[in-house]
Amino acid sequence: MNTKEIPYKIYLDEQELPKQWYNLRADMKNKPAPLLNPSTLKPMTAEELSQVFCEELVKQELDNDTPYIDIPEPILKFYKMYRPAPLVRAYCLEEKIADPRKNLL
């Protein structure tokens, strides 16, 4: 057993910032239900979603297959300029759910 203590808060250097978002839906066996159009109660199309979201977000919202999505360069630049919060390890949650991985790190 590795007794290395991982700190509660982890601050990333610019080089360590993620370059891609992880699309959880790509690995889900049971995909979530699609967003429904409130007036028709049918799944929303890309055209309908584009009235609310920008084109890139519409593509991501409708993508059930791509596991990793590149973070756009303007967002990466913003992340380098301002990181809203450190990564925080949920030690209390791990104890409550008896996470077996906690002893592997």
Image (cartoon, rainbow, N blue to C red):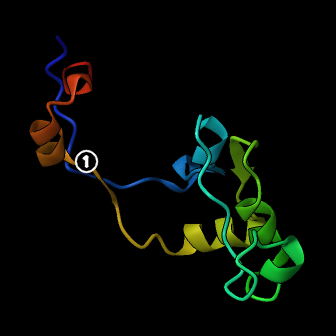
Residue at 57% over, 49% down: 15
Looking at the image, the residue that sits furthest to the right is 47
Residue 31 x %, y % = 62, 46
Nearer to me, 104 or 77: 104
* Residue under pointer 1: 89
Residue 6 x %, y % = 22, 37
Instruction: Tell whether 80 sits left or right of 77.
Output: left
Secondary structure beneath label 1: loop
Residue 93 x %, y % = 17, 46
Residue at 36% over, 68% down: 85
Q: Is residue 3 above or below residue 37?
A: above
Quarter holding the N terminus is top left
Amino acid carrying mark 1 in the image: Arg
Give the quadrant of residue 99.
Answer: top left
Q: Is residue 46 above or below residue 89?
A: below
Give the quadrant of residue 7.
Answer: top left
Residue 35 x %, y % = 66, 70
Instruction: Tell whether 30 sits left or right of 95.
Output: right
